[in-house]
Amino acid sequence: MTGVEDLLQTTPLLIVSISGLVVLVIDSIFRNGERLAFWLAATSLLASGLHGLYGIGETGTAFSGMLTTGGYADFCAALFSLAGFLTLLLSRDYIGSRTTDRGEYYVLILFAVAGMILMASAADLVVLFLGLEMMSLCFYVLAGFTRTSFAGNEASLKYFLLGAFATGFLLYGIAFLYGAVGSTNIDLILSSASHLRDQTFFLIGLSLLLIGFLFKVAAVPFHMWVPDVYEGAPTTVTGFMSTGGKAAAFSALLLVFAPRLASQIGPVREVIAVIAAVTMIGGNILALSQENIKRMLAYSSVAHAGYLLTGVVAANGSGSTGILFYLAAYTLMNCGAFGVVALLESREGGRTSFQDYSGLSKSSPVLAGLMALFMFSLTGIPPFAGFFAKYAVFSGAVAAGYTWLAIIGVLASLISVYYYLRLVVLMYFSEGEHPVPAPVPLAYAALLAAAGAVLFLGLFPSTILDLTATFF
Amino acid sequence: MMTTQLVAMAVFLPLAGFLINGLAGRKLKSELLIGAIGSGTIGLSFVIALILFTGMLGTPVADRTTIVTLFPWIEAGALSTSFAYQIDQLSILMMLIVTGVGFLIHIYSIGYMHGDPSFWRFFAYLNLFIFAMLNLILADNFLLMFLGWEGVGLCSYLLIGFWYDRRFEKGSTGDAAKKAFIVNRIGDVGFLIAMFLIFTTFGSLDFVSVFPQAAAFPVGHEVMTWITLALFLGATGKSAQIPLFVWLPDAMAGPTPVSALIHAATMVTAGVYMVARCSILFALAPTTMMIVAVIGAATALMAATVGLVQNDIKKVLAYSTVSQLGYMFLALGVGAFAAGLFHVMTHAFFKALLFLGAGSVIHAMHEEQDIQKMGGLKSALPVTGRTFLIGAIAIAGIPPLSGFFSKDEILWKTFSGGYWPLWIIGFVGAGLTAFYMFRLYALTFEGTKRWEGEKHPHESPLTMTIPLIVLAVLSVVGGLIGIPESLGGGNTIEHFLAPVFGPAELAMRLHATHGGIEYLLMISSVLMAAAGITLAWKWYRTASNQPVRFAERFAGLYRVLLNKWFVDEMYETAVIRPTVRGSEKLLWKGIDVHVIDWTVNRLGTFAQWVSRTVRVVQTGVTQNYAFVFVAGVLLIIGWILSA
Amino acid sequence: MDLFDIVFYCFALIAVGSAVVVVFSRNIMYAAFALLFAFFGIAGLYVLLQADFLAVTQILIYIGGILVLMLFGVMLTNRVVDVDIKTGTLQIVPAAILAAVVGGSLSGVFYSTWSTVSGTPSDVATTTPAIGEMLMTSYILPFEIASIILLVALIGAAMIARRKT
C-alpha cells in the first residue's frame, strides 16, 4: 500500500511539486515575495537536479506500480530539473522586464518540471498522460505569458488548439490499448505485445500513442505548430519548451517504445525510421531559408528531433544511451542558444533576425563567443557535446542495421552547417551597430555554466554514457 | 591510494602553471613571480617523481609497476581508453629526467629570458610542454601517449616560432616552426597507422593488454613488422632520424633554453622512449630491428660529418644531437634497450649543459652565434667555459665522465651482437664527435678574440650559472650508475630496467657476454676520442691554416658537408616543389574549383530553392496545420495496419 | 429484438441524429442545443453498458458544465459584439476527404474485429463504489496529479482573465 516510503522514493518529484505549491503561496501572501519565490524555486530545482546526478537509486516501483523509481527515472528527473534551473536563471530579468507576474512564472516552470518527471517515471499510461497534460498546460500558459504581446497570444492559442488536438489522439490511443490488453500498465502492455502484434485494436492504439508523442517531439508532419509557437512565445519559454519539453517527450517515447521495438512490432519501427528521415531532411531544409533566429532554431529543433528518433529506431543500448546523452547535450546547448537570443532581444520582441547579429563579436564579444560555441555544438563539431551526441545515436542506428538512416542523418547535418555557421560568420565577419545589452549576472552565469558543460561533455562523454548504459 | 594523488599532482601541476601563466601572465607584472610559478610547479613535479622513485626502490622488483587510472576518457564501441598512467622503472626514469632537467632549464630561463616582452608566454608554453611530455611518458595506453606526442609537437612548434617577428636564415622563425610541425606530421601518420594496426590486431590500446598478447606471437610475424615499421616512422620524425631529421637543425630558431630542453634533452628522445616502451613488439620484428640499427648508425655518422664544418654554435650542437640520437637508435636496433635509455639520460645531462652553455655565450655576445667571430671567451666567461669543457669531454667519451660509459655500452653491445660493420660506423662517429666538439670549444673559448666592434662579454647571472654547474656535476657523475661489470661496476641502471625489457630480451634470445675483447674495444674507442680531441686542439686552439688547406684539398667533400649533404635541396626538388605545384594546378584550380566547389554550390542552391518552395506550406492558419496532422495520422495508421 | 435492443437503437438514434444537426445547422444556438442531445444519447448508451458512474459523469460534466459554459459564451458574445451567430462550413473538400478516410478506416476496423468481440456485457452491479475505492488506493497518485493539473489550469485562467497591469 501507499506510504511514506513511496514518497521517499520519489524525492525529485516531491521536491519540485511541493516547492511549486509553496512558491504559489509565497507569491500570493507576500507583496514583495518575488525574491524569495525565485530563490526557493531555483534552489529546489538545483537540489532535485543534483539528487538525480549524485543519488541515482535502485530501480523500483512506487504508488502501487504507478511510478518507476531510480535509475532511468532519476536521471531524467535530474535532466529536466537542470533544464528548469537554467531557464529560471535566464528568465528572471527577461520576464521581469516584460511583465509583473513573475511568481506565477516560477510556479508554472516548477509544475512543468514535475509533469516531465512524471512522464519519464510513469509505469502506467494514466500517469504518463497526466504528466504530459500537466507539462503541456504549463506550456500553453507560459507561451502566452507576456499577455500584451500579440505574437505571444497567438502562439499560446495555436499551441493550445493543436496540443489539445494531439492529446485527443494520444488519449484515444491509450483507450485502444486498454481495450486490447485490459490494463494501462506499461509493462503489461509491452509484454502482451508478442501475442497481440497482429490485433488491429492493439496496433491502432500503439499508432495513436506514437502520434501523440511525435507531436510533442515535433516530428514531421506533426511539426507545423513549432515555428509559429517558438517564434511567438517568450524566448526563455521557447528555450525551455524546446529542451525540457522535447526531452520529456523523448524519455516517455523511449520508455514505451524502445524495449520491444527491435523484436516484436515490426511495422512501427519502419514507420519511425521513415519519420526520422523525413524529419531530419525537412527540418534542416526548412531552416535554410529562415531569416529569424528563433524560427531558425525552431526548425533546427525539428531536425534534432529527427536525429533523436534515429536513436529510438536503433532500439539498442547504444541508441538509448545515445538519446539520453543527446538530450543532456541538447538541453545545454539549446537553452544556451535561446538564452543568448533572449539577452539580445529588445523589449518589444525585436532584434531577433539574422541581420541583427552581424558584427556582434565587436559589441558583445562574450555573448558572440558563447553563441558561436552553442552553434558549433548544435552543428556537431568536435570537441563539443553535440558531436558525441550525434555520433552515439548514429552509431546505434548503424549497429541495428539502419545504416541508410545514419547516412541520411549525416547528410542532413551537412545541410545544417550552413545555417548554424552563417550566424557565426555574420557575428564575426560582418559589420554592424548594436546597443550593448545590460549585464545580467544570473543569465551570464547560466550561459557560462551551460557552455562549460557542453565542452566538458564533449571532452568526457563517458561520464554520462557510462552512467546511462546501466539503465538499459 | 596515495600514489594516485601524487601522480595526478605531478602531471597536472605543470598544467596549472600553464593555465595561471597563460591566462593571467600578461597581468602579472613581476618576472620573478611568473618564473617562480613556472619553475615551482616543475620543481614540485620533480620532488614527487623523487618520492615515487624512492618508493619504488623500496618495493620488491615484481611489484614495481603501478597503473593509476584517473578517469575514463573515451568509450566508443570496442575502444575503451582511460586517462591512466603507468608508473614503472622505465617511465619513472624518464619522469626524473624530464622534470629534473626541465626544472634546471626553467630556472635558467628566468635569467635568459629576462626583459623579454613575452616572458609570461614563454613560461606558459614551457609548462604546457612538460605537461604534454609527462602524458607521453607516463601514459598506459597508445592513445594517451599520442595525445602527449602531439602535445609536445605543438609546444615545439609554438616555441620554435616564439620570436615570430625575428628572421631566421633565409626565412622567418615561423618557417622553421612550420617545417618542424609538418615534418613531424609525416612521422605522426606512422604513429597513427601503427595505432590502427595495434587496435585491429589486439583489440585494445592499453599497454597491459597489448604487450602480453604480443609476446605470444611468433618472431618475425608480418603484423609485427608492419606495426613496428609504422611506429619507427613516427620515431624518426620526433627523434630526428634519417629521413626526417631535417627539422631539428632549423628548430634552433627558438630560444636557446628551448633548444636545450625540447630539442636536445627531452622531446627528441620521445622516439627512443617509445621504441623502448614497445620493445617487445620490436623484438618480434627482426627486420625492423635491423632497419632501426642501420638508420641509427647512418644518422650518427652523417650528422657527425655535418657537425665537423658548421660555424653556428647552435647548429653544431643540433647536428651533434641528431648524431647522438642515432647512437641511441643503434642501441635499440641491436637490442640494447637499457643502454639506449642510459644514453638518453647521460645525453640529457651533457647536451642540456652544452646548449645552456651556448646560450650563456650567445647571451654574452649579444645574440652572436658564429663561432668564427668568437674566441678567447674563457677568461670572460669562466664558469660557462669550464662547464662547457666538462660537457665536451663527457660527450667525447673520455672516462670516467658519463658519456664514456653510455656510448661504450652501446658500442660493445653492437659489437658483441655481431653487428661489426655498424660498430665501425659508431667507432668512427665517436672520433668525429670528439673532433667537432673540441673544434667548437676551441674556437669559442680558446685563442684570441675575433669579433669586431664594442662588445664586453661578461659572465651570466647566477640563475643561469647554477643550472650549468649542477648539470656539469651530473655530466661527470651520471655515468656511475652504469659502470659495466667488466670494469667492476654493477651496471645498476641495466638491472633496474631489466624487468621492463625482460620479455623483449627473451624473445631475442640475448644474453650478456663479456670478455677480453671488451677491454680492447674500450681502449681503442678512448684512443679514437683522444685522437679527435688532439687534432681539433692542434688545428683550432691557435689560428692555423691547416683546416683551410684541408678544406681546399677536399673542396668537393667540404662543400657537401657545409651544405649538409644537400638534403634540404633534394627534398625541395623531389618532394616539396612537385607537391606544391600539383596541389595548386591540379587539386586546387582543377579538382577543387571545378569539381568540388561547383557541385557543392549547385547542391546549396538547390537546397535553398527547395526550402523556399516548401516554406509556402507554412501558412500560419491553424486549420491547415491540423489538416496536415490528420493526413499524417492516416498515413501512419494505414501503413501500420496494412503491413 | 428485445427491449434492450429497442432502447439501444433509440439512444443511438438520438446521439447520431443530434450530431448530424450539430454539424449541418447554420445557427450556432441550434447546434449547441443539438449537442446537448448528442451528449445525452451517449450517456444513455453508457447506462446500457452498465457504466453507471460514467453515465452520470457524462451528464454532470458535459451537459451541466461544458455545454452550459459554451452556451454562456455564445450568448455573451452575441450580446456584446453583435456578431453573426450563424456559421458557415469552411474547407469542404479537405474535410470531405478526411471524413471519408476516417469513416472508411473505422468501418474497416469494425468489420475486421466484429467477430472477435463478445456480445454479452459484463455483469457488474454498480461501478461507483469500486471506482471510488480505487481512486483512493492504487490510483491515489493519478488522483493527486489531476488536482495539480486543475490548479495549473486555474492559474492559467486567472492569468488570462486578470485585468491588465
Image (cartoon, coloured by chain):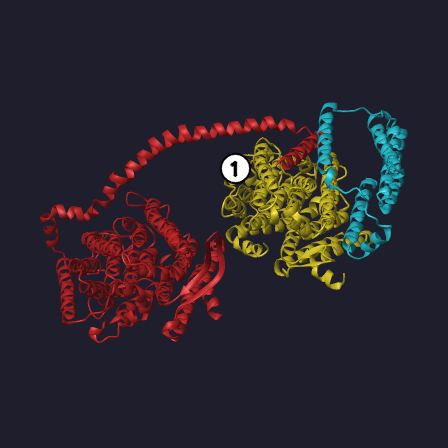
Chain colours: A yellow, B red, C cyan
Percent x, y for residue C61?
Answer: 86, 42
Mark 1: give few (<14), some (14-19) or many (20+) Cα within 10 Å. some
Of A120 and A303, the residue lying toward us:
A120
Name above or below for residue A144 compared with residue B252.
above
Of B123 and B608, the residue lying toward us:
B608
Percent x, y for residue B33?
Answer: 46, 61
Q: Residue at position x 13%, y 66% from top? A: B524
Secondary structure at numbered mark 1: helix
In the displayed structure, does residue A455 sit left or right of residue B209?
Answer: right
In the displayed structure, does residue A174 sit left or right of residue A400?
Answer: right
- Residue A212, image quadrant: top right
Residue B11 in view, yes or no: yes
Residue A96 in view, yes or no: no
**What is the quadrant of the N terminus of chain A in the image?**
bottom right
Percent x, y for residue C142?
Answer: 77, 52
In the displayed structure, does residue A331 sit left or right of residue B525?
Answer: right
Of C10 and B176, the residue lying toward us:
C10
- Specify the farthest residue to the front: C1
In the displayed structure, does residue C19 sit left or right of residue A301?
Answer: right
Name above or below for residue A439 compared with residue B13.
above
Residue that carries the numbered disc 1 in the rendered image: A408
**What is the quadrant of the C terminus of chain A in the image?**
bottom right
Name above or below for residue B615 compared with residue B44.
above
Identity, as a three-letter code, of the amino acid under mark 1: Ile
Name above or below for residue A156 compared with residue B56.
above
Q: Residue at position x 28%, y 66% from top? A: B506
Q: How many marks?
A: 1
Q: Chain of mark 1?
A: A
Of A100 and C73, the residue lying toward us:
C73
